[in-house]
Image (cartoon, rainbow, N blue to C red):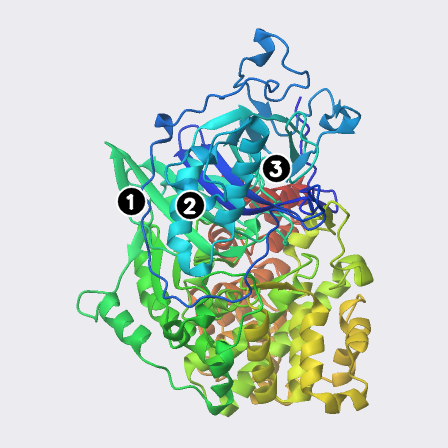
Amino acid sequence: METQLDPMKDDLPLMANTSYMLVKHYVLDLDVDFKSKIIEGSIVLFFETGSQYKKTNSAGEESCQSQFDETSKMRTSEPCYIPIINVSTCSSKTECNDFAVSGKEEEATSDENSSHSNNEQDSGISSSKDCCDIENHGNKDFLLVLDCCDLSVLKVEEVDVAAVSGIEKFTRSAKLTGVSKELENLRNQIVHELLTLPADRWKEQLYYFTHCSQAPGCGELLFSTGTWSLEIRKSGIQTPADFPHAIRIWYKTKPEGRSVTWTTDQSGRPCVYTMGSPINNRALFPCQEPPIALSTWQASVRTAAGFIVLMSGENSAEPVQLQEGVLSWYYYVTMPMPASTFTIAVGCWQEVKQEVKQQSFKQRAAVETNTECSLPSSQTDFRWHEEVCGHVDYPCRFQDPAARLQAVISYRVFAPWCLMESCEEYLLHLIPQCLSAAYTTLGTHPFSRLDVLIVPSNFSSLGMASPHIIFLSQSVLPGGSHLCGTRLCHEIAHAWFGLAIGARDWTEEWISEGFATFLEDIFWARAQQLSHDEIKGQQELKALLRWRRLRDEVQNSEEELQVLRPKKESTGELSESGASIVKYGLKAEKIFMQVHYLKGYFLLRSLARTIGEVSYLASLRKFVIKFHGQLVLSQDFLSMLLEDIPEQKGSGLTVESIFQNWLDTSGIPKPLLEEGETWKECQLVQQVSGEVTKWIQTNRRIRKSGKKKMKQNEVVFLQLLPDQLVLLLECLLEEKTLCPRILQCLERTYQLQEQDAEVRHRWCELVIKHKYEPGYGDIERFLRDNQAMGVYLYGELMVNEDAKQQELARKCFAAAQEHMDASSAKVVAEMLF
């Protein structure tokens, strides 16, 4: 019986022993089968020996160590198609039979044992013995550990890269013949030379990666699987340097695997996509999950005709027909990133394009992407991009003169057929505005293109950013451009903070989410081209809403989950093997918390107010230029920022004080409490206060007089912005009683069912609190169409202990449960039953 993952365990283990061997490139070759809900195929991993192990020869000289050229080569990104050889034409049979059967522990000493087995071994079932216990001449065999779960591993084999035609150029020896030991060393040398090609030879590198991945196998490797890992060894190989540096794993996913979700889109058509699972991609392919394992990848995905494959890739893939009814899609990435950022979505998506009457996308993109954007004087420091980048060698856009002037990168929008019109109304024209605003703020776009996909209704978030692709919930589409624009800005900000610059320790997720939340406001204000006073008003209003949310979350969550740097001084530390844990990474309630967004935002807002926004944004741009393509810790940003403002040291603003006040403690940060609620002076907030007073007074008057109707124009209410409406409804939620006539008038006055999802969520809360039965239909529609936001409402429906509301909750859950996100469904089920 397979051991099931326990989502209630607090910590997520990262098992891969990256200190000994480090994946540098993945080649995936997969088939997507919607009938069986399985993705099946192979993945080839190309390794370098890790930092903790250096092989020395008899003369004491190091050999085959990865030394990256720190100078990035300039080039213009061009899409290229690399033909994929049919895998069935490549022999996967072993060329030598001195290995044990895959997954078995005994040495192959008989014909029966030396035959090759394709028996599945499920991730979650450990073999009867531990591979580490097998010793050879008194020494243990080296064990390669990969992160893996919910996968059926069929076979693991070494890849004979030396058999590839033309590969001789990557060998120091002219001969490809020799004894077995020399041939093994030669294969590893070829992989090393291929991995360390300079950035300006990226096309050649991808070409040989493709052909090496299709080379025949040269011996099966022993493997065993556990709940969280895949362990691989080669009999008699005792060191990482001697272990095969190119291995192929044949596997298939499981329908219940948690890295992808199989569902139907809003038009009722089947689809599958990576939904940002807490376990990341380890149930999609065996990988190294620790952030330090920065890698590139390429993937060929085959699926039935009629489906479109979208993926994290630099190229806008065009399908190639392999046979009648089967298409192949190919994507690649040349910028090293954590495997957790890999994203795929396969469905019957439709591309949303401008109407024929309007200027075509290609015409508009040609103008936007080839016109030099005039930058504010504060951004003249962009010119020192020409300095050497601090990351490993890859084709970097920050070193590309054309990319540095590209205010709007090429983009596409995809959605289910039934949502195309909604996307045309707002989303399509918001993307260039938001991209341009982001460029004006931070400079060079780290990625060359962007796909935006409206994902199925079971998506558990409002948005998710991955390299070259953003997922948006359908919840951002109705109700005008505000929610759609702000969420789009948030996800675009992740291109810099979260992707181009990643957290070295995943527990410091505030580095990604705090920055994206802070920059969301900056981008959106610039996209709307607001005046200075309008910007200040909207940002103060937003700060108040976030303050209220943070206050509520701190009051209703465990203290240990409120700390932005839970590992404190141990942050970033790894075990000797490179394995580590993501503290509280699997804690169920953490998935729905926003404390890292909110406290991170308020820290950055506080620093901006202290330093001055102009100087602060200049420091952000400097940080991006210095650290793009790298992993960072909190102190990397804070130290650089404080170095730029030495005058603040006298005021006691230090890295240590920021740790103590903001990052290492639970609750509301002390400086935020001392700051005072400055937003109360904001005109937009004062307008809401005035409207709240009108509604409260009217409510009291109606209850006192017992009138059945309000007189026409008896009270004149102001038109309010979406965020003002959210604040108004939150304030009215604090009132003990609102009579039905007030609720009816409230809904009609602001046409609440036409507002965005944030406003409608607060309206549903009011309906639940006051048991306003005419609004129960609104709750039902909200829970059906906004699953990313509805979990809290289920709890409210149950807490009131009202039979009709509890019946409504169970009815809505029964209708949505089948396609609901697994984490959300589990939490809701615990509320209801």
Residue at the spot 44% in from the left edge and 76% down from the top edge: 439
> CB atoms at circles 2 and 3 under 8 Å apart?
no
How many numbered dots are placed on residues in this image? 3
| Side of 456 where 414 appears, left or right | left
| Side of 566 where 118 appears, left or right | left
Identity, as a three-letter code, of the amino acid under mark 1: Pro
Q: Quarter of the image for the N terminus: give it.
A: top right
Q: Nearer the viewer, residue 745 or 202?
A: 202
| Label 2 vs 1, first from the N-terminus | 2
| Label 1 vs 3, first from the N-terminus | 3
Task: Read off the residue under disc 1.
Answer: 319
| CA gap, disc 2 and disc 3 | 35 Å
Q: Nearer the viewer, residue 565 or 56?
A: 56
- Identify the image quadrant of residue 771: bottom right
| Side of 605 where 348 appears, left or right | left
Task: Read off the residue under disc 3.
Answer: 148
- Identify the image quadrant of residue 592: bottom right
Identity, as a three-letter code, of the amino acid under mark 2: Lys
Task: Read off the residue under disc 2.
Answer: 169
The percent position of residue 693, horizontal first and vertical second, equals 61, 82
| Label 2 vs 3, first from the N-terminus | 3
Residue that extends furthest to the top in the rendered view of this protein: 111
The percent position of residue 359, horizontal first and vertical second, equals 21, 71
Identity, as a three-letter code, of the amino acid under mark 3: Cys
Q: Dot 2 lies on which element?
A: helix
Q: Is residue 266 visible?
A: no
For label 3, the crowd category at 10 Å Cα-Cα, with few meaning under 14, some 14 to 19 and many 20 or more, is: many
Q: Nearer the viewer, residue 16 or 55?
A: 55
Q: Dot 3 lies on which element?
A: loop
Q: Is residue 599 visible?
A: yes
Residue at the spot 57% in from the left edge and 82% down from the top edge: 617
